[in-house]
Image (cartoon, coloured by chain):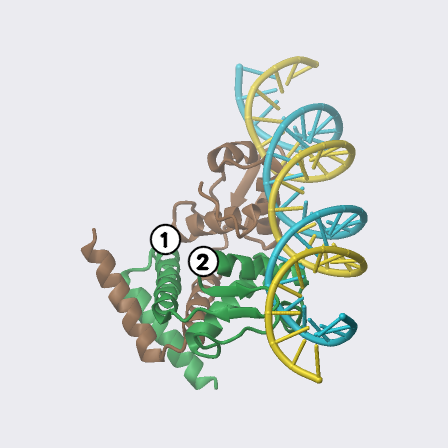
Chain colours: A green, B brown, C cyan, D yellow
DNA sequence: TATAGTGTAATAGTAAAATATAACACTAGG
DNA sequence: CCTAGTGTTATATTTTACTATTACACTATA
């Protein structure tokens, strides 16, 4: 896993796992790979991975069973709320940043549209 | 200045100053506040601020005159390139993140539109 | 019962970031 | 020439993040 060196690794691991749950790669009730396996998968230290998982446990997104594993919550609405939260956070950030650069609402919409079209053509 | 504790402070200061140049608050050729004044303004250490400025100097966005001050570059096209770079980085990030959450291109456009409309109504 | 695998935590060391403090070099103006 | 203000750098300390290593507690299975 490629880490951005401007953001703590445990935070990026947490975000990555959230994405897998929202995208459906990790399903409600599903058992996560073990801490040791995840450490190998993402190329980070076991304690760093555990740090990420601890925050997800505290957030109620995963449930930990010592000796058995960590499991994605069965409460689907928690995953849905997480999705809303992440989507809104992203939209807020891009809007605030571009607004601060004096782009109008219309310019923000237009530049995203152009960006998407450009991506489609370069593939 | 409110710092996000997930990102280095010098990096946020750098980004903040870039925004002021692009937004026109800091104009080409204009003298920046002194390092010591900026440290007070943003509530960070002088060395941390100097770290941010050093990167901006290395990037050619500001010019440093020891004993006189730091000045925004007169090369307007550098500011314009910076704007393009920051805007594109923001669009790339929001697109990648939302795409990774399995939103279609259309859904990404629609949700940003909804977000903007919502912001307009809440003000 | 023993073993392998699981989660969790402790200790120690390293690196990066931030701070506090001080000092040096340059500049402009009185 | 002196002073105030400027940028720049050095040193030391603290904090946070990360790693390596080890060990403990729990669980399931043979």
Q: Report whether mark 1 lies on the same chain as mark 2.
A: yes
Percent from the top left, x then y, of residue A34? Answer: 62, 71
x and y percentages locating residue B65 in the rendered image: 61, 39
Q: Quadrant of residue B103?
A: bottom left
Report whether residue A117 is seen.
Answer: yes
Percent coordinates x, y for residue C15 in the rendering: 73, 52
Marks 1 and 2 sit apart, C-alpha to C-alpha, by 31 Å
- Residue B40, placed above or below residue A30: above
Closest to the observer: B38 or B121?
A: B121
Q: Residue furthest left?
A: B121
Asked where in the image residue A91 lies, by quadrant, the reply is bottom left
Which x, y percent locates residue B6? Answer: 53, 52
Crowding around mark 1 (Cα neighbors within 10 Å: few <14, some 14 to 19, many 20+) is: some
Quarter of the image for residue A120 reads bottom left
Q: Residue under circle 2?
A: A59
Q: What residue do we see at 32% from left, 65% from top?
A: A108
Residue B96 seen by the camera: no
Q: Nearer the viewer, residue B121 or B83?
A: B121
The residue shown at (46%, 56%) is B76
Q: Chain of mark 1?
A: A
Whether residues under marks 1 and 2 lie with C-beta atoms below 8 angstroms apart, the answer is no
Crowding near pointer 2: few (<14 within 10 Å), some, many (20+)?
few
For mark 2, give the secondary structure: loop
Q: Residue at x 47, y 68 (%)?
A: A18
Horizontal arrangement in the rendering, residue B72 relative to residue A95 (left or right)? right
Which quadrant: the N terminus of chain B?
Answer: top left
Q: Chain of mark 2?
A: A
Mark identifier at residue B112: none
Query: What is the number of the mark on residue A100?
Result: 1
Q: What is the secondary structure assignment of the residue under circle 1?
A: helix
């Amino acid at each position: 896993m490629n880490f951005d060196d401007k953001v703590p690794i445990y935070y990026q691991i947490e975000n990555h796992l959230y994405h897998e749950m929202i995208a459906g790669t990790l399903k409600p009730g599903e058992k996560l790979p073990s801490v040791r396996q995840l450490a190998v998968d993402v190329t980070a230290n076991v304690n760093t991975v555990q740090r990420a998982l601890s925050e997800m446990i505290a957030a109620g997104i995963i449930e930990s069973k010592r000796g058995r594993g960590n499991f994605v919550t069965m409460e689907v609405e928690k995953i849905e709320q997480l999705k809303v939260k992440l989507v809104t956070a992203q939209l807020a950030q891009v809007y605030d940043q571009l607004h601060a650069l004096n782009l109008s609402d219309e310019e923000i919409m237009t530049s995203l549209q152009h960006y998407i079209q450009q991506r489609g053509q370069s593939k």
